[in-house]
Image (tube, rainbow, N blue to C red):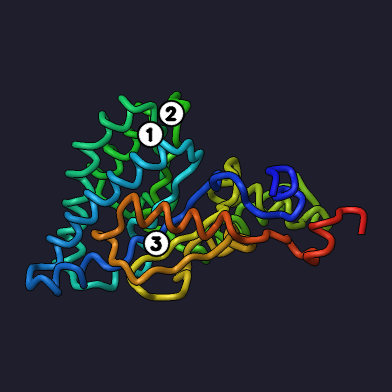
Amino acid sequence: MSANAQLLEGVATNNPRHIAIIMDGNGRWAQKKLMPRIIGHRAGVKAVRRIVEYCTQQGIEVLTLFAFSSENWRRPKDEVSLLMNLFMATLQTEINRLHENNIRLRFIGDIASFDAKLQAKIAAGVVQTQENTGLTLVIAANYGGRWDLAEAAKAIAADVLAGEIAITDINEDLMHQHLALADLPEPDLFIRTGGEQRISNFLLWQLAYTELYFTDALWPDFDQAALEQAIISYKGRQRRFGRTGDQVLNPTV
């Protein structure tokens, strides 16, 4: 089948522009090896490096990683503290590497809830890489999809109260403009490692038409070959966006 024929059928012949990943299974990976959970999180950082490198090589435009959810504060205090320390240490060691590889770093989430030093390091990393033109690496930290929607609703309500827009102006496009990632393409492929099959309050709005892929592989074991298999699965799917298969095959139907 020719490339043109595949496109007419709606098959995703090209790599996804935007991949979003829930990196699940660090703690269980460590427990299986009879090691502290933090060792699993450190191994997870190495997996992030592998996946970022692969996405850069493959010309992926955006990679969004769910690093710390708004629900993760419920974990034991010691683990949260260790995670915050690892987060800071990783930023210190990785930002220059990202910059050298023309990667733009972005963050989404309620960053104001973090320690002042961590906030400063996040801000510095964003500024240092903001002019880069390669892969955009988005880190979702203290992020939740419901929080994202609530923040958008508050911003729109403030505009209504200020008289800048009318209630009748509120529609899906306006809501989208006030969400995190509004300036980036919506995810084409969502991946969750670790065997769970749910999206766990991650990019609730943005994943409406995303292709979902779940794997039993724990995040520290997720490598370039595993990501390649996810992309192969994505490429074999027909993306209809509400249309029938016949309509995708023949747009005049």
Is there a contact, CB below 8 Å, between mark 2 and mark 1? Answer: yes
> What is the distance, in whole Å, between disc 2 and disc 3 at their CAs?
24 Å
Of the pair 234 and 87, the residue shown nearer to us: 234
Residue that lies at the very extreme toward the front in this rendered image: 1
Q: CA distance from mark 3 to mark 1?
A: 22 Å
Cβ atoms at labels 2 and 3 below 8 Å apart: no
Question: In the image shown, does 103 or 177 lie closer to the viewer?
Answer: 103
Q: Does the residue at mark 3 contact the one at mark 1 (Cβ under 8 Å)? A: no
> Which residue corresponds to the image point at 83% horizontal and 64% vertical from the top-left?
246
Residue 79 lies, with reference to residue 7, above or below; the image says below
Residue 226: image x %, image y %? Answer: 36, 57
Location of residue 67 by image quarter: bottom left
Amino acid bearing label 1 = Val
Identify residue for label 1: 126
Query: For the point 45% across and 24% down, which residue is it?
Result: 131
User: Label 3: which residue?
Assistant: 22
Which marked residue is nearer to the observer: mark 2 or mark 3?
A: 3
* 243 left or right of 130 in image: right
Three-letter amino acid code at the position of disc 3? Ile
Counting residues from the N terminus, which is met first, the one under dot 2 or under dot 3? 3
* Residue bearing mark 2: 130
1 vs 180, left or right, is right
SS for tag 3?
strand
Near-viewer residue (3 or 181): 3
Point out the image quarter for the C terminus: bottom right
Q: How far across and down, in percent of the image, does residue 95 sit?
A: 27, 34
Q: Position of residue 166 (x, y in %)?
A: 81, 53
217 is higher (above) or lower (below) than 55: below
**Residue type at tag 2:** Gln
Q: From the viewer's perspective, is the residue at label 3 or at label 1 nearer?
A: 3
User: In what element is the residue under mark 1?
Assistant: helix
